[in-house]
Image (cartoon, rainbow, N blue to C red):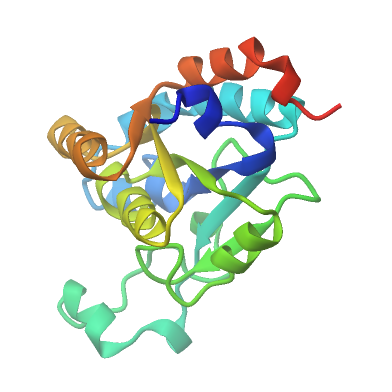
């Protein structure tokens, strides 16, 4: 069984930042206005910021996932979830689709997705294969929907999954905890951002010169 240090080795791992966007995280975003509590999403951002700072210092790649919805991807099957309505979440070229308190550096890839999983009809797998990534360090929102969907599919595509309990957030504690149980039981390792940073700090030989 691989240790956490092996599963977060900078040369073989990438931090995946899923949907940390205004419409999902901020109370004045689309989900907040619709009555979803966004406090957990906002509360985990300092942990995510600390993780990204450490990842960049060790040379661990960071990949941002950004949901964008537009007419060209509003299929009938997709909009059926909303009673046939398009909805106003993360529409193309809107404030709601912008990142919240984190942002990619100029050389960090941004992968646009239109469905829950960041692997569906996107370039994510190509980016990961190009970077020779084997391990996915999962962060973002929401824990039980887009982050879990991406992690599940990543595992089934033979990536190792490290799912961060304190760098992910859902719209209820129950949803968050059940998703962590699923990850821990079936799909990968659940850890905290502090444990990952400690593993990086304890293994300087794994950090690029």
Position of residue 110 relative to residue 188, above or below, is below
Quadrant assignment, res 56: top right
Counting labels gives 0
Residue at 38% x, 30% y is 1
Left or right: where does residue 47 sit relative to residue 154? right
Farthest right residue? 209
Residue 204: percent from the left, percent from the top?
72, 16
Residue at 61% x, 58% y is 128
Position of residue 122 relative to residue 179, above or below, is below
Residue 171: percent from the left, percent from the top?
23, 40
Q: Nearer the viewer, residue 94 or 121?
A: 121
Quadrant assignment, res 168: top left
Left or right: where does residue 185 sit relative to residue 31? left
Farthest front residue? 1
Left or right: where does residue 146 sit relative to residue 65? left
Position of residue 209 relative to residue 171, above or below, is above
Left or right: where does residue 123 sit relative to residue 131? left
Residue 122: percent from the left, percent from the top?
53, 72
Residue 37: percent from the left, percent from the top?
25, 37
Residue at 19% x, 73% y is 82
Residue at 37% x, 69% y is 115
Q: Nearer the viewer, residue 119 or 68?
A: 119
């Amino acid at each position: 069984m691989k240790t956490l240090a092996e599963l977060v080795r900078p040369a073989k791992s990438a931090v995946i930042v899923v949907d940390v966007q205004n419409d999902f995280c901020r109370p004045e975003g689309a989900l907040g206005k619709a009555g979803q509590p966004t406090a957990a999403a906002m509360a985990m951002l300092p942990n995510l910021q600390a993780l990204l700072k450490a990842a960049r210092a060790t040379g661990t790649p960071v990949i941002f996932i950004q949901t964008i919805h537009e007419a060209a991807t509003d299929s009938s099957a997709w909009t059926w979830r909303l009673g046939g309505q398009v909805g106003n979440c993360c529409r193309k070229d809107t404030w709601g689709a912008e990142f919240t308190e984190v942002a990619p550096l100029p050389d960090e890839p941004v992968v646009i997705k239109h469905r829950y999983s960041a692997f569906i009809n996107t370039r994510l797998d190509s980016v990961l294969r190009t970077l020779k990534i084997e391990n996915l360090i999962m962060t973002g929102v929401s824990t039980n929907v887009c982050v879990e969907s991406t992690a599940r599919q990543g595992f089934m595509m033979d990536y190792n999954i490290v799912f961060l309990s304190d760098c992910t957030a859902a719209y209820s504690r129950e949803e968050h905890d059940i998703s962590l149980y699923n990850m821990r039981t079936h799909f990968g390792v659940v850890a905290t951002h502090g444990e990952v940073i400690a593993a990086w700090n304890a293994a300087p030989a794994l950090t690029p010169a």
